[in-house]
Image: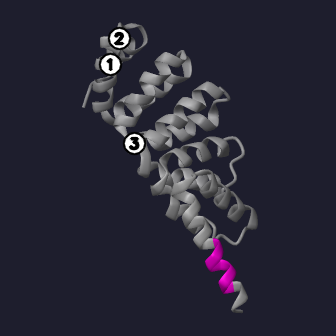
Amino acid sequence: MTDRTRIEELITDLRDGPLAARRAATAELGESGKAAVEPLIATMQAGNNDVRWYAARALVRIGEPAIDPLLAAMRAADDRDFRRYATAALAGIGAAAVEPLVAVVENADADLQPFAAMALCRIGDPAVEPLLRLMQNPDPKTQERAALLLWKMGEAGAGPLTEALETGSRSANNK
């Protein structure tokens, strides 16, 4: 665990340091865990896109503890560039981010839904089963959103989507 002073020093390196210092700061911040999440998100919100990229990479290294704070910050911020980099971080975190992202889709959170969709498509295979489950939701619009996301995933989602639709069609015909 890294103390607050060290995190601030590393954030300064991330913002202003030469390439080697930025890379080293990204790695160390990633090892710092939960204590670095909020400072990294604040840096992403105030930084230029280069700084956002390094901060996002550090958040990917931190992983699961960054998911909920990233989603909360995305809800609070209107900055599309910040949201894009936060989306990239969530996609980079991968499978651990799937359920919170699926919840955004399920709840039809209009502000975050396009970003959640993008992240789920990038995550790929780990998102397929939760989206297939979402297709069983009683709300037709939720089913439609899930099906569209599976289709947008390409190869990872298209086969399972086709199978689910064929199974659903057979079940409806057998009634």
Q: Secondary structure at mark 1?
A: helix
- Residue at 49 percent across and 44 percent down: it is 68
* Residue ID at (59%, 45%): 116
Q: x, y percentage for residue 96?
A: 42, 51
What distance separates the C-alpha of mark 2 from that of mark 3? 26 Å
Q: Which residue is mark 1?
A: 23
Q: Is residue 166 magenta?
A: yes
Whether 93 is drawn above or below 162: the answer is: above
What are the residue bounds of the magenta stretch?
Answer: 165-171
Query: For the residue labelled by badge 3, is the local secondary structure a helix, a strand or a loop?
Result: helix
Q: Residue at x 56, y 34 (%)?
A: 73
Q: Give the class, few, some or many, for how many residues have Cα within 10 Å of label 2's Cα (few <14, many ≥20).
A: few
Q: Amino acid at mark 3?
A: Pro
Callout 1: 10 Å neighbours few (<14), some, many (20+)?
Answer: some
Viewed as shown, does residue 32 lie left or right of 158?
left
Rendered-image quadrant of the C terminus: bottom right
